[in-house]
């Protein structure tokens, strides 16, 4: 037991912590201790937490309610710690580290309980740290490591209790509590909760299914009603901007995402293979699963071939790629087949033609959450959205292998397939490690210094922004988010297709906006920013990371504010670092510069 603890828990934990400390020291010297995060989103949570802890206002600014957090649980956790320790930027980092260590401890406990050989368990744990890039997730300062832990526990407990009467006791209460917490951690957990409820239903426990579903989503309902009472939508703003686009029954059946990631498609293929191996289906249903597996594999291999030329030429692995018409059609059909399988398997359970066991339940639930993510989930932005897919699929691999009799007799092609699927994951792991420092540096140069500028001159002043996190956390400006994440009026207008130049003028009047620091090119698709806004300068930092998005235009929305804004820019060089390049112009209408 001691050997198992040392190899499976202590070794991966020591490696994880050692690398985290190395990055922290690098960041301290690079940012003077002012930033530990690769993206500005961490500060959005911190801004809401600050305003809730200090002023009792749940929003990016203390001046109005804003349902801007896609992870209310994470935001409330930060707010609670702020109450105790004050407004420290390292708090989300510590919470992420604790979440990662708890995940490693859970893996150790589950592997030991399933009698996975300690060397295989240790290698898997180390791979999970690297392939999931726990380091990258840690330095987002976001909720994704907490999400992984909650989903891991729900998945594992569900696999134990669905086919037994143990749901009458502590485990059923436990899975309800975990699911309730997960439901307000990330929306991606909803598909897992729905899958568990569906299996309770399929096993004839209607009451338990309804009770589990109702209590799991109770926190979502409470937060939604609270949000509506403050004039916002039922869901967080980001749902209207991203997750709820493309509505209707046809979209539900026949849908293909705009792009996909090879590092997430690997787990999708593995989950389909798990379903084929461990549910032991026969006949038409088995043929459907084989067809689905073949479709996903074909798209995966074509994607790898598309990436090969640029990889050989530049050593760059493009983890995402756009579908052409034929590939998009193939993926839509394959996703449709997946949804048919998800519906038919519980029905087949009722007919008792499938040999269900805990491994089959595990593979079925894993398949559901991966298919659901490809239908509605996000990809990219430091690979954080799809990280849980990779973690859960790799975690289950040694458990599933132990369920296969004579695994050593499996064909060479099967083993080769595993190697091919894991190639994008390893490349992705190295990519994230490489990107942590430059991403942290650019967040410091762009977001922290912009926050310093706004704090010095705009506290109590209405200002339109499209990079709101650090500014909202550090300052007391009346921030209006023109992207919509932090301001419901904008999110609703974008969702309804009514966000345009006239809407921007109305928002300027409603929120008494004096100045705007935006990227005008972002708003051309909405008709462009108002032409009468006066450009007084530009703000640029080096394109160390996120090239092309580090150039801001500074405008006076209120023409009487132009001279004041120019003076603020003139004084900025005395306290901002030389990497911040500010150009000052005579106040000129934006429309005249755009011609």
Image: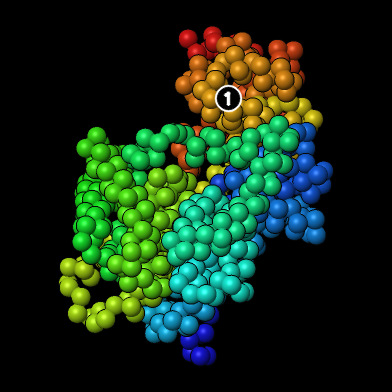
Tell which residue pokes out farthest to the right in this image.
55
| Image location of residue 239, percent across then percent down | 55, 39
- Residue reaching furthest left? 412
Q: Position of residue 441 (x, y in %)?
A: 55, 48
Residue 390 visible in the displayed image: no
Left or right for 594, reference 530: left
The percent coordinates of residue 187 (x first, y second) are 54, 49
Q: Residues within 10 Å of mark 1 (few under 14, many from 20)?
A: some
Locate residue 282: give its quadrant: bottom left
Relative to 430, say whether 538 is above or below: above
Task: Look at 42% across and 58% down and name the residue there.
Answer: 389
Classify 173 as above or below 214. below
Res 236 → quadrant? top right
Q: Residue at 47% x, 21% y: name it.
A: 525
Name which residue lies at 32% across and 47% down.
335
Q: Is residue 409 above or below residue 2?
A: above
Residue beneath the point at 37% across and 63% down: 350
Q: Position of residue 206 (x, y in %)?
A: 52, 59
- Mark 1, residue position: 493
């Amino acid at each position: 037991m001691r050997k198992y603890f040392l190899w499976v828990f202590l070794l991966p934990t020591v490696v994880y912590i050692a690398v985290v400390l190395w990055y922290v020291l690098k960041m301290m010297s690079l940012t003077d201790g002012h930033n530990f995060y690769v993206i500005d989103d961490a500060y959005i949570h911190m801004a809401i937490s600050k305003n809730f802890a200090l002023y009792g206002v749940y929003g990016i600014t203390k001046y109005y309610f804003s349902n801007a957090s896609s992870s209310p649980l994470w935001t409330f956790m930060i707010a609670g710690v702020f109450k105790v320790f004050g407004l420290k930027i390292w708090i989300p980092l510590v919470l992420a580290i604790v979440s990662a260590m708890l995940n490693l401890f859970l893996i150790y406990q589950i592997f030991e309980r399933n009698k996975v050989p300690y060397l295989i368990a240790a290698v898997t744990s180390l791979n999970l740290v690297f392939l999931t890039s726990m380091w990258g997730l840690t330095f987002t300062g976001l909720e994704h490591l907490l999400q992984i832990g909650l989903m891991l526990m729900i998945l594992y407990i569900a696999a134990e209790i669905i086919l037994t009467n143990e749901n009458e006791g502590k485990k059923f209460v436990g899975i309800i509590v975990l699911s309730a917490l997960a439901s307000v951690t990330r929306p991606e957990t909803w598909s897992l909760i729905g899958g568990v409820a569906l299996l309770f239903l399929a096993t004839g426990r209607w009451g338990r299914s309804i009770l589990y579903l109702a209590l799991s989503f109770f926190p979502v309902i409470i937060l939604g009603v609270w949000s509506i009472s403050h004039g916002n939508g039922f869901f967080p703003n980001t749902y209207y901007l991203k997750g709820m686009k493309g509505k209707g029954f046809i979209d539900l059946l026949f849908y293909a995402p705009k792009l996909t990631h090879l590092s997430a498609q690997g787990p999708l293929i593995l989950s389909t293979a798990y379903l084929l191996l461990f549910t032991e289906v026969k006949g038409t249903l088995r043929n459907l699963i084989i067809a689905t597996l073949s479709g996903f594999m074909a798209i995966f291999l074509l994607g790898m071939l598309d990436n090969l030329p640029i990889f050989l030429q530049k050593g760059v692995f493009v983890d995402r790629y756009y579908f052409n018409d034929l590939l998009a059609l193939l993926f839509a059909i394959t996703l449709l087949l997946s949804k048919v399988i998800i519906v038919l398997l519980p029905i087949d359970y009722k007919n008792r033609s499938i040999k269900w066991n805990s491994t089959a339940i595990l593979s079925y639930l894993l398949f559901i959450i991966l298919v659901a993510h490809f239908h509605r989930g996000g990809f990219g932005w430091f690979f954080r959205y799809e990280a849980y897919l990779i973690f859960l699929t790799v975690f289950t691999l040694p458990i599933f292998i132990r369920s296969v009799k004579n695994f050593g007799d499996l064909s060479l092609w099967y083993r080769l397939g595993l190697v091919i699927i894991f190639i994008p994951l390893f490349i992705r792991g190295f990519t994230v490690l490489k990107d942590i420092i430059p991403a942290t540096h650019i967040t410091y140069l762009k977001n922290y210094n912009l926050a310093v500028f706004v704090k010095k001159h705009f506290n109590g002043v209405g200002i339109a922004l499209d990079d709101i996190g650090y500014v909202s956390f550090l300052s007391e400006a009346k921030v209006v988010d023109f992207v919509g994440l932090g301001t419901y009026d904008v999110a609703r207008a974008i969702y309804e297709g009514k966000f345009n130049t006239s809407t921007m003028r109305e928002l300027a009047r409603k929120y008494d906006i004096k100045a705007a620091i935006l990227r005008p090119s972002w708003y051309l698709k909405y008709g462009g920013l108002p032409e009468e806004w006066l450009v007084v300068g530009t703000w640029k930092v080096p394109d160390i990371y996120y090239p092309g998005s580090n150039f801001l235009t500074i405008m006076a929305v209120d023409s009487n504010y132009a001279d004041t804004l120019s003076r603020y820019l003139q004084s900025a060089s005395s306290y901002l670092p030389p990497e911040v390049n500010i150009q000052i112009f005579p106040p000129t209408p934006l429309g005249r510069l755009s011609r």
